[in-house]
Amino acid sequence: ITMIDVDAWFIVTGFITYDDIARLSVVNKELNSVMNHSAIWEQQCRLYFNADASVSKTTNDEEEQNDAVVDNHRNRFKSHFQSFIQTYGHDSIWYYERVMHCWTSLTKWSKLYLPQLLTTFNAVATSTEIAALKQEICSTAMLNSRHYDYLTPYLLFLGECANGQKIDLGVGACGMYGYYRFYNKVSAGHLLSIADAVAYTELIVRRYGKNVQDLWLFCGGFPGNGFVYQGDMPITVPCLTFIDGHTGHICKLTGDAQVLHLKHMHSNSFLEHLEWYILHNVTANNYRVDPQRGILRFPLSDAAVSESMTQGIVCRASPLFVPEVSSITQRNFIFPYHIEIECPTNYYDIRSAQGQDMKRRCEQCPSEKNKFRLQRRKWVICDDGKTETVQGDGVIGMYPEVFVNQKLFSYESCSQQNVPSNGTMGGSFIFERELTEDSVERFEMQVATYKLDWDMCQW
């Protein structure tokens, strides 16, 4: 085995872990020298951490003349690798690439659609800050073994991507985890810096006691604590999203201090949730984006969302579940919903399949000359096995019109349910246009049934 040259070992070590390299290095003196070769550790850095290997190279003559240069060059990559392991743990080699893929995807998307979001992120956390955080959230067994398991991706994000967001007045208006609003209520989710996470976690533990002592707050928004949306939209509903210190699950907290691990949104770990949110929702453009306020968290497509088309006009209904103002003990579960009425446009490329579809929709939709106005609404709400029908004029005091090229109309409202699952809501909007003083033409736009279920709605 000692007869194998460095080039061959370079190939072999590309298929084994650094633990295997460490074991080989103690076999004998010759292997120790080979396993400490800079090329092998440069390969490990590139393989697992995509580390910048732009270490100044030395020529062969320099290497022959200066053993100190050789030792320095040899050790730099190994030290870099060991530093990663010391900071983020042995599991970091398996998580690093996935975490960085989320971050690079988010930053690339933000540059195109939401540049303001990028201005809210702090610089990366220092190794000292990461070390202090590990003392706060890691068990003694984790610290002793340097296996931080499900917490590793969270540490990596803070230390290699961004140490949370700025939340001071007027700056943190664009939460990484988006915002929602209904009635006069507003909430937003910001990735918290280590310092803010420590402060707010301690505050919540003091308020709620032992129910939350094993939870770590990583995403938050708080009324009256500097979080402001556009001045006229202060946060009124808290956002409390935790990592469970025992299981790694993503958890929410209800208004009556009950801890929920909801099944939706890939909430079994920080990384699964991060990948689901960034890769399959944000960068997939599954949310509307306001250039100033940020990501509107009512999804365009999801398990609980419904969509229907009437006369070429799309009606989309998107609910959320808000644990923070729901109460299990009082049987009060809050489901705000976002309704969109989307008319077709005649600005399309007829050569594409989407253009052909839009052309058909335009042919079915009323023209601006023959526009219709929403006059009445009808809702059928199912809750706890009971069905209730609600009818009224307009929607939240408005009477929108529909016609080709009409801009998107949307509004938010809310349903309060007695039980958190198996609820549904659907109905119709009645549109009319006046033909004569004595006659009107009307059509009924269907609002397909959507789900009011805490395990199917986003939160």
Image (spheres, rainbow, N blue to C red):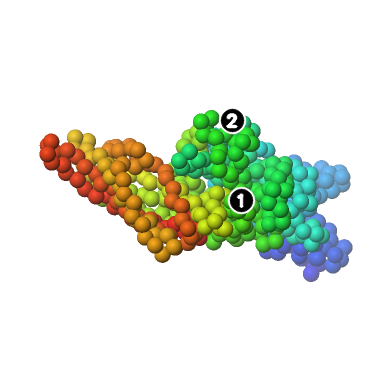
* Amino acid type, label 2: Gly
* Viewer-side residue, 395 vs 68: 395
Mark 1, secondary structure of its residue: strand
Tell me what residue is drawn at x 56 percent, y 45 percent. Answer: 177
Residue 292 locus on image (x, y percent): 50, 33
Query: Which mark, by number, is residue 170?
Result: 2
Upstream in sequence: badge 2 or badge 1: 2
Give the left or right position of residue 78, taking residue 338 as reference: right
Per the model, the C-alpha gap separating discs 2 and 1 is 22 Å
Tell me what residue is drawn at x 34 percent, y 51 percent. Answer: 390
Q: Residue furthest bottom?
A: 1
Residue 417 locus on image (x, y percent): 46, 56
Tell me what residue is drawn at x 59 percent, y 30 percent. Answer: 170
Q: What quarter of the picture does the N terminus occupy? A: bottom right
* Amino acid type, label 1: Thr
* Viewer-side residue, 427 vs 179: 427
Mark 2, secondary structure of its residue: loop
Give the left or right position of residue 316, taking residue 323 as reference: left
Callout count: 2
Residue behind mark 1 = 241
Give the left or right position of residue 54, taking residue 404 as reference: right
Q: Residue furthest front?
A: 330
* Viewer-side residue, 313 vs 160: 313
Give the left or right position of residue 450, taking residue 444 as reference: right
| Residue 53 visible somewhere in the drawing | no
- Rendered view: 324 above or below 122: below
* Other-residue count near label 1 (Cα within 10 Å), few / some / many at <14 / 14–19 / ≥20: many
* Viewer-side residue, 309 vs 161: 309
Q: Are marks 2 and 1 in contact (CB under 8 Å)?
A: no
Residue 346 locus on image (x, y percent): 26, 39
